[in-house]
Amino acid sequence: MFVLFNWIRTLVIGFIDRRLGLDFGVENLQIGILGVIQSLILFIPGLAVGIRRMHDIGRSGWWSLLVLIPLIGGIWLIVLDATDSEPGSNKRGPNPKGTAPVQSGAWG
């Protein structure tokens, strides 16, 4: 959810930057002032979410550095991010999805 809302926020801020004329071009790359501020504010929380995701699948947070490997590292990190969490608890804490099995109730 963090990444989804971040993408939506980025699109909205990019639109606002462009409409207000706050963007400036650097070699075919449009960078907006509000976008830069957003990136600086969300860098640490984004890093924390990525590290927590690695912990959920039972890997060290250092695996987040895969993004530094051109092309293949980013793809590999997306695959790891899409991997299901370990069932139950691991050495880094409980599964954020919970460990109780889904009960069939009146709706199921």
Image (cartoon, rainbow, N blue to C red):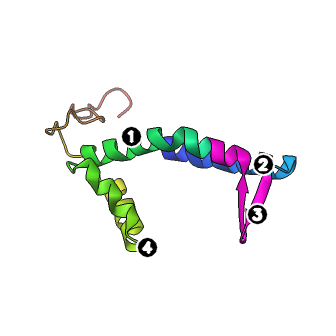
Under mark 2, the amino acid is: Asp
How packed mark 3 is, by other alpha carbons closer than 10 Å (few <14, some 14-19, many 20 or more), is few
Q: Is mark 4 on a helix, strand or loop?
A: loop
Numbered circle sitting on residue 80: none
Say which label, 3 or 2, has the lower sequence index: 2
The residue that label 4 is drawn on is 71
- Name the residue that disc number 1 marks: 48
Residue at 71% x, 71% y: name it: 27
On the picture, is 45 further left or further right than 76? right
Q: In this view, does 70 lie above or below 64?
A: below
Instruction: Please tell me how crowded label 1 is: few (under 14), some (14-19), or many (20+) other residues with Cα within 10 Å.
Output: some
Residue annotated with mark 2: 17
At label 3, which amino acid type do we have?
Gly
Label 4 CA crowd tier, 10 Å (few <14, some 14–19, many 20+): few
Whole-number angstrom distance, CA of label 4 to CA of label 3: 24 Å
Q: Nearer the viewer, mark 3 or mark 2?
A: 3
Q: What stretch is highlighted in magenta?
A: 23-37
Q: Earlier in the sequence, mark 4 or mark 1?
A: 1
In the rendered image, which residue does mark 3 sit on? Answer: 25
Q: Distance between the residues labelled 3 and 1?
A: 30 Å
Q: Earlier in the sequence, mark 4 or mark 3?
A: 3
Residue 13 location (% of width, % of height) = 71, 45
Q: Position of residue 77 (x, y in %)?
A: 36, 61
